[in-house]
Image (cartoon, rainbow, N blue to C red):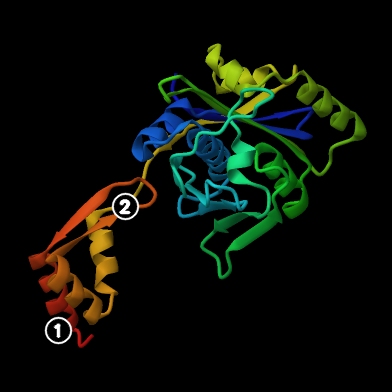
Amino acid sequence: MKDTVIHAVAANGHIRVITCTTTQLAEQARRQHNLWPTSAAALGRVLTITGILGSMLKTEKEKVTVQINGGGPIGTIMADSWPNGDVRGFVGDPQIYLKYNDSGKLAVGTAVGKDGYLKVIKRMNMKNDFTGQVALVSGEIGEDFAYYFTVSEQTPSAVSLGILVDTDNAVIASGGILIQMMPDATEADIVLAEQAVARLRPVSELVREGKDARALAEMLFEDLEVLRESPLQWHCDCSRERFKAALTTLKRSDLEEMLQQDHGCEVRCEYCNTRYQFTEQDLKTILDFKAACGK
């Protein structure tokens, strides 16, 4: 089952519904970063909601970035998404494995913490980017984003995010559901949405049973109208050329120190863990370029 995101409406357009499956996306992230179960669950949830946010953007040049830090052992979580469905992200500590004693479930809230913030930055190719920030409610990600949408974007929302991780650490099911009230929603529409949320089972269980994004949406409301369906996939746009350009911005003294001590350098992309090697000759070429430019 391919990862996809569905945009739909219900109640004569008064309720927005966005559902997605992200099993392959979350599993690719786990493999890229060698994530332990709780780190995989936390990052997978953030990648899922970031993918939903990216699918809501209008033009190809826009981008959304999510940043979360709750003071917990996992550290900072960051993710980017674009309208074409590309998503990437990382966690501060990839090797977190915590469970709640009472339920045995992965303790994402404990790993993330709630003494911190959730920030969303939308780069919309305008003079000023949109930035919204709220305090974390629980660190469980879903609740935090429901609070973010309601407070920062003034859109009452329900968010369900879920991931199942197997005994070998592989992600076997991942998905998300976002239900939002539109500005012209009535009290009856709100009750209808609340009833749908009350009936909702854990989204990870539904995905594991084989329900795709369309099936997740259709089970919520009888009068659902699907507007569009699009793919979601892991993709990082880093490249050797970009890191070479970044090295060019360093001070000559820093580059010369790399030459003297290490005879080259290795650069790692935080988002995808890809490593790029730059040899002694590469650094000399960069120094020659800076000299030619008078830098």
Rounded to the nearest angstrom, the CA distance separating label 1 from label 2 is 27 Å
Mark before the other along the chain sequence, 1 or 2: 2
Circle 2: residue type:
Cys
Give how far across and how far down residue 209 sits, in percent.
55, 11
Q: In the rendered view, would you say 249 is above or below 19?
A: below
Residue 116 sits above or below residue 250 on the image: above
Label annotation for residue 238: 2
Q: Which mark is residue 64?
A: none
167 left or right of 64? left
213 above or below 277?
Answer: above
- Crowd around label 2: few <14 · some 14–19 · many ≥20 (10 Å): some
**Which residue: 51% across, 35% down?**
44
Question: Residue at horizontal 75%, vertical 16%?
Answer: 222
Q: Foreground residue, 60 or 274? A: 274
Residue 182: x and y, percent? 78, 40
Seen from the viewer's position, the closer of residues 256 and 210 is: 256
Q: What's the residue type where badge 1 is placed?
A: Ala
Q: Residue 140's x, y, as percent?
A: 65, 38
Write the residue at 46% across / 54% down: 61
What is the count of numbered marks? 2
Q: Which residue is mark 1?
A: 292
Instruction: Tell me the quadrant of the picture where the N terminus can be found.
Output: top left
Residue 235 at least partly seen: yes
SS class, disc 2: loop
Q: Position of residue 228 (x, y in %)?
A: 56, 30
